[in-house]
Image (cartoon, helix red, strand yellow):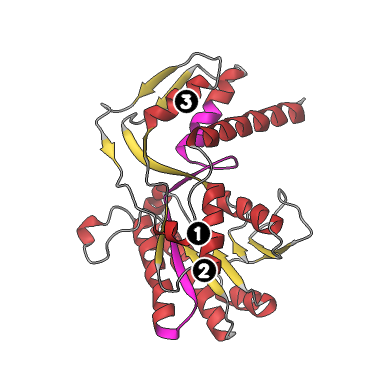
Amino acid sequence: MITGANGFTGRHACTYFSAKGYNVIAVVRNELDTVSSDRIQIERCDVTDKTQVNVLIAKTRPDFLLHLAGQNHVQNSWEDPLSSYESNIMSTAYLLDAVRNEQNACRIVVVGSALQFNPNNLSTLPHPYSFSKTLQMLMAQSYEALFGMNVLIAKPTNLIGPGLSTGVCTVFANRVARMEIGDCEKILMTHNLNAQRDFLDVRDAVHAYEILLQTGEKGHIYTVSTGIPRYLKEITRLYRSMTTVEFDIITETDNKEILEPVLPTPLVGLGWKPKIAFNQSLKDILDDQRRRLANRKDESS
C-alpha cells in the first residue's frame, strides 16, 4: 500500500513497486490517472478521516505500507498549521491504529523529513511543518514501543527527479525550458546561490524505501540522503551547460553562505547507495519539463 500515490514521490513509488512485481494498492483522494498497470489497484480514501482509514485497512490488509501522504510545504504550514497537523500527524495515527486493530503483521515505513527538529530543544523549532513531521515520527515510534508494531521511519533529504514537484531543481528547469520556447524572459530568479542542500534522486529514495520495508529494523530512524552538499549555483551552472539559451541570474539576497547540515545515511549498511548521478537527475528533470511544455502546446493547438 502506498498512501499519497498521486504525489511526486508516490507516482514514482507506484511505478517502481509495480515494475518489481508487487501488487500495489495506490491510495488517493482523487483518481490516479498517470500511472497504469494491472498490478496497481486504486483505492480512494481521505487518510485524515478515521472511518475511511479503518475501512481501507480492513478491506485490503496490506503486507507492506509506505506512508507518503501529507502536507509538505513550509509556507502552507504557517498559513494553516492545523491542516498540517491533521495531514501529517493524525493521518499517521489513523493508519497505525487501523493496522493495530486488524492485528495485521504489516511492515510500515513512515516517511518523515530532514526538517524535523530535536523535540528536547524547542528553541530549534523552525516552523509548524517541522513540528508536524517531528510528532509524526514520535507517533510512529510510540506504536512500535507500546504495541510492538513493525514500524520504522525514513527521513529523506531534498528529493529531486522528473515529475510534478515544487522543488528548486524543477522550478529552475521549468524556467529554462520556457526560455527555450520563448515563453518568458531569459532571467532566472533565485533567493541565494550560496544556499547549500543535499539533493537525492527520488528514484533512489524509492529503492531505499523498498530496502527498509524488507530489512529495516523496527523502531529505527533511517536518514535517506547522499551525504554530499550542493550549492544552488552548481544547479544553475549545470543547467546552463544543458541549453543553448543564454540567461541572466538575479538573486534576491546578498548571497551569504547558507549551509544545510549534511546528514549521514545509515542505509549504507543495508546495501543501499545512490546510483543516479546529480547531473543526470538534472538532465532528466529538464527533459521532463521540455516534454510537458511540448505536450501542452500540442493540446492547445
In the rendered image, the vertical position of residue 99 relative to residue 16, given as above or below: below
Q: Of the residues tagged 1 and 3, which is closer to the observer? A: 3
Which residue bears the numbered disc 2? 215
* Residue at image mark 1: 70
User: N-terminal of the two: label 3 or label 2?
Assistant: 2
- The type of residue carrying mark 2 is Thr
Depth check: 155 or 276 in front? 276
Mark 1 residue type: Gly
SS type, badge 2: helix
- Asked where in the image residue 82 lies, by quadrant, the reply is bottom left
**Element carrying mark 1:** loop
Query: Marks 1 and 3, Cα distance to the nearest angstrom?
Result: 32 Å
Asked whether 194 falls inside the magenta stretch, the response is no
Q: Nearer the viewer, mark 1 or mark 2?
A: 2
Decide if residue 252 is on the left or right side of residue 282: left
Asked if the residue under mark 2 is in contact with the one under mark 3, i.e. CB atoms within 8 Å, the reply is: no
The circle drawn on residue 16 is: none
Nearer-the-camera pick, 198 or 4:
198
Q: Which mark is residue 238?
A: 3
Is 291 above or below relative to 62? above
Q: Quadrant of the N terminus?
A: bottom right
Residue depicted at x 40% and y 53%: 77
